[in-house]
Amino acid sequence: MTAAFDYEDMHHLVDRLTPHQVRRLRLLVTQDEELAQAAEGLPPRPAEGQAVPAGLLALIGAVNGPEDLAERHDDHIRERMRERFGDQA
């Protein structure tokens, strides 16, 4: 396996994790001596029970889409813009 394949493979894996699984993975990474160095630049995680600001939820919204959404997000956004506003090019 090449490093590039491993990198892409990990991205696909993380994309499939539930929010709870992502929190567990982040905990494991921050507790590992070697991996914790990569996690140092991450923003602090909100404390348990701390509400996410409503403005942030409005900005993010719900993400339901095809399995390739992460890879083809630009194409999907273009399609949705055409559906809503027509082709204005």
Image (tube, rainbow, N blue to C red):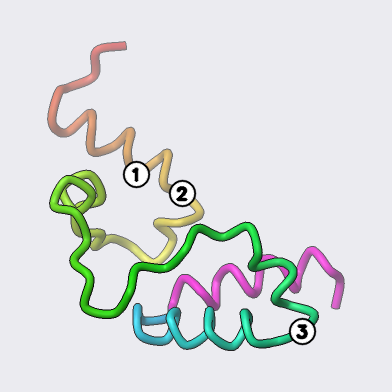
- Residue range highlighted in magenta: 1-16
Q: Is residue 83 left or right of residue 26?
A: left
The residue drawn where x is 19% and y is 59% is 62
Q: Looking at the picture, does residue 88 appear above or below residue 25?
A: above
Q: Where is mark 2, residue-wise?
A: 72
Return the residue nearer the eye: 81 or 40.
Answer: 40
Q: Amino acid at mark 3?
A: Glu
3D distance between C-alphas at marks 2 and 1: 6 Å
Question: Quick one: label 2, few (<14), some, or many (20+) residues within 10 Å?
Answer: few
Residue 63: name its quadrant: bottom left
- The percent coordinates of residue 79 (x first, y second) are 28, 37
Secondary structure at numbered mark 3 = loop
Distance from Cα at disc 1 to Cα at disc 3: 39 Å
Quarter residue 28 falls in: bottom right
Residue situated furthest right in the rendering: 2
Going from N to C along the chain, the mark reached first, 1 or 3, is 3
Q: Nearer the viewer, residue 3 or 37?
A: 37
Q: Residue tagged by mark 3?
A: 33
Callout 1 environment at 10 Å: few (<14), some (14 to 19), or many (20+)? some
Structural crowding at the residue carrying mark 3, measured as other residues with C-alpha within 10 Å and reported as few (<14), some (14–19) or many (≥20): few
